[in-house]
Image: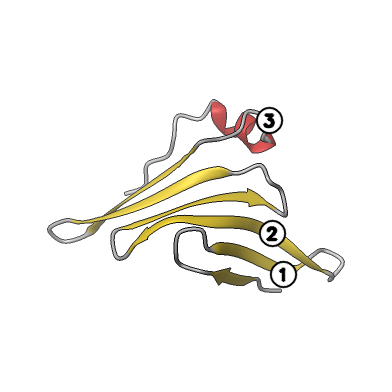
Amino acid sequence: MGADFELDLKPGGAMTWSGPSKDGKPMRYVTGEVLRAEPPKLFEYKFGMGDEAVMSRVKVELTPETEAVKVVVTNDDWAEDNPAYAQRASSTGCTVS
């Protein structure tokens, strides 16, 4: 029960995750659009769950450091009517090291 990921890695390019629903029928899990791609240091996109037009923005920044790569992920630009916004509005963020 996997998912298919399709990505057109250019500004304006489509990004989708699709796979089987609980009843086995095909469904789209995530719909998105590439905003910026600057390999190997930046990937920025907007996405929404399913086929929804309500989207937020994600920016992934990679910065080489002495013995590792620093990864910063920012998820912002939420629409106030996005149900996921309410879940994250009170969050103080997450740091993984």
Classify residue 29 by image quadrant: bottom right
Q: Please, what is the three-letter code of the amino acid marked with disc 3?
A: Asp
Using the numbered discs, state the Cα–Cα distance from disc 1 to disc 3 in whole angstroms: 26 Å
Q: Indicate whether 42 appears above or below 77.
A: below
Using the numbered discs, state the Cα–Cα distance from disc 1 to disc 2 in whole angstroms: 7 Å
For this rendering, which residue is in front, 83 or 7?
A: 7
Q: Residues within 10 Å of mark 3 (few under 14, many from 20)?
A: few
Residue that appears at 57% across and 63% down: 14
The percent position of residue 55, horizontal first and vertical second, equals 61, 44
- Count of marks overlaid on the render: 3
Q: Which callout, 3 or 2, points at the residue further toward the start of the chain?
A: 2
The residue that mark 3 highlights is: 81
Q: Residues within 10 Å of mark 2 (few under 14, many from 20)?
A: some
The percent position of residue 56, horizontal first and vertical second, equals 55, 42
Q: Which callout, 1 or 3, points at the residue further toward the start of the chain?
A: 1
Is 2 on the left-hand or right-hand side of 58? right
Labels 1, 3: front one? 3
CB-based contact (under 8 Å), mark 1 and mark 2: yes
The percent position of residue 93, horizontal first and vertical second, equals 44, 35
The percent position of residue 68, horizontal first and vertical second, equals 21, 60
Q: Secondary structure at mark 1?
A: strand
Labels 3, 2: front one? 3
Q: Secondary structure at mark 3?
A: loop
The residue that mark 2 highlights is: 29
Residue that appears at 56% across and 35% down: 78
